[in-house]
Image (spheres, rainbow, N blue to C red):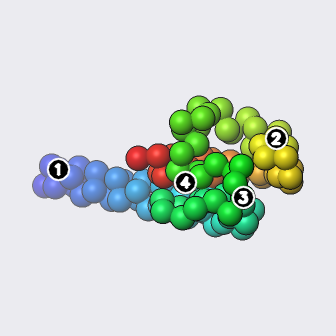
Amino acid sequence: MCKFLVAAFAVLFVGSASADDDRQRAYGEMSIKQNCSRCHAVALTDESAHPEAPAFRNLSQRYPIEALAEALAEGISVGHPDMPEFRAEPEEIGAIIAYIESLQR
């Protein structure tokens, strides 16, 4: 009986963590689509509308993804010359990073 309870708890915990990860990635995707998709490719197969805007699926080839958290918090104001400044809210940062990391796989 005890082994069953431990196994059931493990399944619930893993399922819950996975659902939380999915929700976080979905929030990051929504934020990126709202704020970045006008210029950047933000999915696995789309193309960037702006010629100097890198596709998010290729960002790890140019930048360490974990370094983006600080830039998102402080405000990204560099990139292509006509890129508007973008500053993420604290709760968005982890979600954005999670979504971008999911594209790198």
Q: CA distance from mark 2 to mark 1?
A: 56 Å
Residue that mark 1 sits on: 2
Q: Residues within 10 Å of mark 4 (few under 14, many from 20)?
A: many
Secondary-structure class at tag 1: helix
Packing grade of label 1 (10 A; few <14, some 14-19, many >=20) is few
How far across and how far down the image is residue 86, in percent? 82, 51
Label 3: state its secondary structure.
loop
Identify residue for label 2: 78
SS class, disc 2: loop
| In this view, 19 is above or below 105 | below
Residue nearest the observer in this picture, 65 or 90: 65
Q: Amino acid at mark 3?
A: His
Number of marks present in the image shown = 4
Is residue 42 visible in the rendered structure shown here?
Answer: yes
Sequence order check: which comes first, mark 4 or mark 2?
Answer: 2
Distance, label 1 to label 4, CA atoms, is 38 Å
For the residues labelled 4 and 2, say whether their Cβ atoms are less than 8 Å apart: no
**Kind of residue at disc 4:** Tyr
Q: Which mark is residue 50?
A: 3
Q: Is residue 92 visible?
A: no
